[in-house]
Amino acid sequence: MTTRSLLLGLLLLTPALQGRAASFECIGTITQVQTSATGEVRIQPTWRNDVVTLCNAITPWKGIPIDVCKRWHAHVLTAQLAQTSSRVYYATATATSCGTMGTNNTADAPDQVGNL
């Protein structure tokens, strides 16, 4: 393989790598839990220090079913009261890290919410 062919192959691969979604987990305590009149369940975690939407307890939000949202809501309320560490896992996120997660409804949809 020539150097030119190798370089061309790398250049063609670069856009595909840049377009991939990130996956990561965010760990910290929940300082606030909020619910809105329209059903959004929002948290203010120490890993973001701003309000992030987890799900919606009235209508499915970004593919998260209502019954899952209700369980997550119970979890984050319990975690906030106990001040235990929580883990939110994002399998496919547009954000690249916990600190750059969108706020409110622009947050990525989590895949898992749990404790450590």
Image (tube, rainbow, N blue to C red):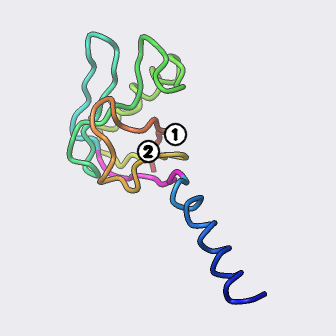
- Magenta residues (range): 21-29
In the rendered image, the residue lying farthest to the right is: 1
In the rendered image, the residue lying farthest to the front is: 4
Residue type at numbered disc 2:
Val
Within the magenta stretch, is there residue 24?
A: yes
**What residue is disc 2 on?**
88
Q: Is residue 89 above or below residue 34?
A: below
Within the magenta stretch, is there residue 57?
A: no
The quadrant in which residue 59 appears is top left
Image position, residue 37 (x, y; %): 26, 10
Image position, residue 20 (x, y; %): 55, 54
Q: Residue at x 78, y 87 (%)?
A: 1
Crowding at dot 2, Cα within 10 Å, few <14 / some 14-19 / many 20+, comes out as many
Q: Residue at x 33, y 20 (%)?
A: 40
Residue type at numbered disc 1:
Gln
**What residue is disc 1 on?**
112
**Relative to 79, 31 lies left or right:** left
Crowding at dot 1, Cα within 10 Å, few <14 / some 14-19 / many 20+, comes out as some
Mainly helix, strand or loop, the magenta region? strand
